[in-house]
Amino acid sequence: MMSPAAAMLTILRDALPSGAPLHAPVFEGREWEYVKDCLDTGWVSTAGEYVDRFEHLIRDRVGSSDAIAAVNGTAALHVLLVAIGVEAGDEVIIPALTFVATANSVAHVGATPHFADIERTTLGLDPARLDAYLTAVGEVRGDVLCNKMTGAPIRAIVAVHVFGHPCDMGGLVTVARKFNLDLLEDAAESLGSIHGGTPTGAIGRAGILSFNGNKTITTGGGGAIVTNDTALGDRIRHLATTAKKSHAWAYEHDAVGFNCRMPNINAALGCAQIELLDRFVTEKRGLADWYRDRLQSVGGAEFVDEAPGNHSNFWLNAVLLDDQAQRDQLLEDAHTHNIGLRPAWRPMHWLPMYAGCPRSDLSVTEDICARLVNLPSGVGTAREIAQQISGAASS
Ligand SMILES: *Cc1c(COP(=O)(O)O)cnc(C)c1O
């Protein structure tokens, strides 16, 4: 019998074009038109009508009352953490299974990432185990939850919708409320994903998006903060714009601000891309259907699916092999055949700069990281597969 890795490689090699990337942008809407308009009018920098339009389109999409476009997702999370009052010496709960940017943003504030474990179903923070963990490790001083071991205040939870799959936000809202913590969403990967009828991003107090080149839609580089908290949104816009007080000519700044608003030329790309989002998500979900269907026949390989109640954008498809040896074999063989498979990110607590950070038991994270492989998931790949399916059906 073929090993799971060999069986998977056969399926992928037969169907995917050589060089299929993990993800790649597609520009086929009004990108040229909008970007040209920026150049023609001279409005290329951090003010201009495309920024306003893009923020409006993001609000519509996420269902938030406010959206502030930023230079990237990392900067967006940094300024958001500052705006909610996270300070040097504080701790912020995040999953260890995430892109390094989540931890970096916490560290840029001078705060410490505090890692908690994930659920197998969503790959996001596990509310029940987080509740038990905070009960064990936390101690309320005044009205602030502190880490008994370090004495540091725990200020917030940043939930990450990993690979686009929404986490159990209902459960996390309850835990955050119980311990008086701000709940934020790193929705960098999940634009277009819906949890229990609500788009991800602003289910918690606030969240961030990313429009990096490898995300579902792109502005080249870019991000946004989304929130329903009007005062917080105003504060973020102010902080992100050098904390300059509004005045016709005077330079007056009232805080240590950031320069992290999105330039108009990037927002122009964003306006064109977000018009394509529904189509892209539909096509990406079609590719996920194909992977799910094909992987059913492979023993020892489990497709990472959306949890009940979730509608995922399937930003990155993923499969879990039975063990690390199978995973390693699949990665090696796929790379020999020029197919863009990737392992999961190295979990944050295994990176040298975060190895000493406080953490709960992370056994689910470690198990998942050892066995997971991300599969080519871009819209281009979705189209190749869709063509093969319709070709096979008509021949
Ligand atoms: C992409 C990403 C970010 C950061 O976004 P950038 O725009 O690349 O700075 C943050 N968190 C997660 C989970 C991401 O995937």
Image (tube, helix red, strand yellow):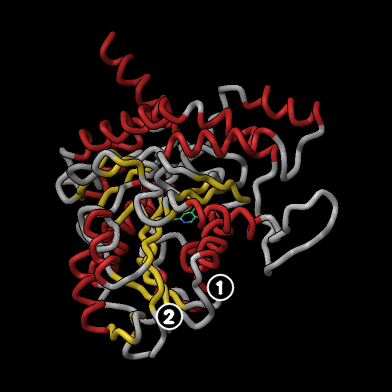
| Residue 325 appears in view | no
- List the single residue furthest toward the top: 394
Residue 269 circle label: none
> Circles 2 and 1: CB distance less than 8 Å?
no
- List the single residue furthest toward the front: 247
Front-lying residue, 218 or 299: 218
Q: Is residue 26 above or below residue 222?
A: above
Q: Residues within 10 Å of mark 2 (few under 14, many from 20)?
A: few
Amino acid type at mark 1: Val
Amino acid type at mark 2: Ala
Q: Residue at x 30, y 35 (%)?
A: 288
Quadrant position of residue 382:
top left
Query: Which secondary structure, mark 1?
Result: loop
Image-based side of 212 in relation to 198, left or right:
right
Q: Is residue 33 above or below residue 66?
A: above
Front-lying residue, 27 or 376: 27
Q: Is residue 223 above or below residue 74?
A: above
Q: Nearer the viewer, mark 2 or mark 1?
A: 1
Indicate which disc, 2 or 1, sits on the residue closer to the N terminus.
1
Mark pair 2, 1: CA separation: 18 Å
Query: Which secondary structure, mark 2?
Result: loop
Q: Residue at x 52, y 77 (%)?
A: 87
Quadrant position of residue 17:
top left
Residue 109 circle label: 1
Residue 355 circle label: 2
**Residue 51 placed where, x, y %?**
64, 38
How many labels, in total? 2
